[in-house]
Amino acid sequence: ASRQARRCRTRLRVQKKSGLWFRLRPYRGRWGLVIGPLVFCAALAAMQQMVWAIRYDGDLTGPQQAALRQSLYSMDIYEGAVLTQEKIRRTEKLLLSQSGELGWVSLNFGKGRLVVEAVPAAQKPAIEGNEPQDLVAKADGRILEINVQEGFAAKTKGQTVAQGDVLVTAGKPDRNGRQLATHAKAVVTAQVRRSYQCVQPLRYTALVPAAGPESRFSLRVGQKSIPLGRWEAVPQALTQTKHQQLTVLGFALPATLEEETVLPRRQQAIELTRTQARDYARLACMSQLYAQFPDAAVSARQEDCQWGEEELTYTLTLDFTADIAARLEG
């Protein structure tokens, strides 16, 4: 049309262009507009194996979910981690073997979301052995009451027994001389007098808080941790780490915000007063008592303090009632 117009001494002027070619011609040479969406789609496809969000299902309380989240975090499963089916199955076995509070756990991962399903383990009653073993006294005392559930009583109420004496036998001969074996089980309540001794230093060195707790934050993406601010190493400090998923306008991101609480400590010499030393020593002796006799009921006590320049030798004599029956091992 332009050649014919020139022959007629006419000039053509384009007033409007239409078509896909003319629409795309201004973007000629700007390959980033094409490569950018392709790279973005490829990144989304590759990040499907990355954890974007973790959800907990099941009859789990808040503390149980927090403990389970901490266990997963210690096994390198968190927002931003890359998961495989092999790692998921291995983690399930580790959670069941290491945690006695879970009866069943399942990890389901798909499209960036990890769903954790767990059921708390039912409390199982303690199962006693059925071996025929005698019950002996684990302390000297006078029997106040004896309740034999299984076995044969070797002592009666009011008798005085020594440590190691047989209280309930697991076997008894019948009229024909044959030994009858059974499982011995009984509660033998006795009045006991026992002494406990503890040595308490009057001066010692201990770690005490040097200042208030400090919070440090870092951003963790995958295996990389990016500190948010400058950190200084604090020797002999107590640390506790918490982490939470990073979200923007309610949208979960494959990243974790870590908060590390640091409590600085320092060595300090501590000097106890006589009252404090006596209280600490008494507490240590009472701990020994209840470790050996959990059901002990103390009726009277007598204290003996031997003071030295650097330590206190404390002797506590107690009168108490408790169950003194113990299974004879071996």
Image: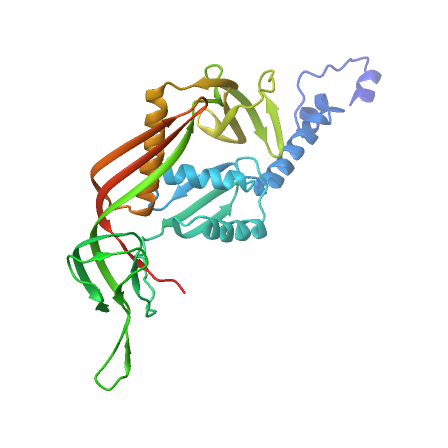
Q: Is residue 197 left or right of residue 190?
A: right
Q: Residue furthest bottom?
A: 176
Q: x and y percent of residue 323 in the render?
A: 24, 52
Camera-side residue: 181 or 311? 311
| Res 168 visible | yes
45 relative to 143 in the view: left or right: right
Q: Which residue is drawn at 22% across and 66% down?
A: 154
Where, by quadrant of the figure, is residue 285 drawn? Answer: top left
One can see residue 61 in this view = no
Image location of residue 17, percent across then percent down: 67, 22
| Residue plotted at (23% across, 61% down) | 186
Nearest the viewer among 132 and 254 is 132
Pick the quarter of the image with the C terminus. Answer: bottom left
Residue 99 lies, with reference to residue 327, above or below; the image says above
Placement of 303 over or under 194, stated as above or below: above
Q: In this view, does 300 lie to the left or right of 265?
A: left
Residue 44, given in percent of the width and then of the height, sits at 60, 37
Q: Is residue 205 above or below residue 192?
A: above
Q: In the image, 101: left or right of 43?
A: left
- Name the residue: 48% across, 43% down: 114
Quick one: 149 or 256, which is closer to the camera? 149
Out of 106 and 155, give the one closest to the viewer: 155
Which quadrant does the N terminus fall into?
top right
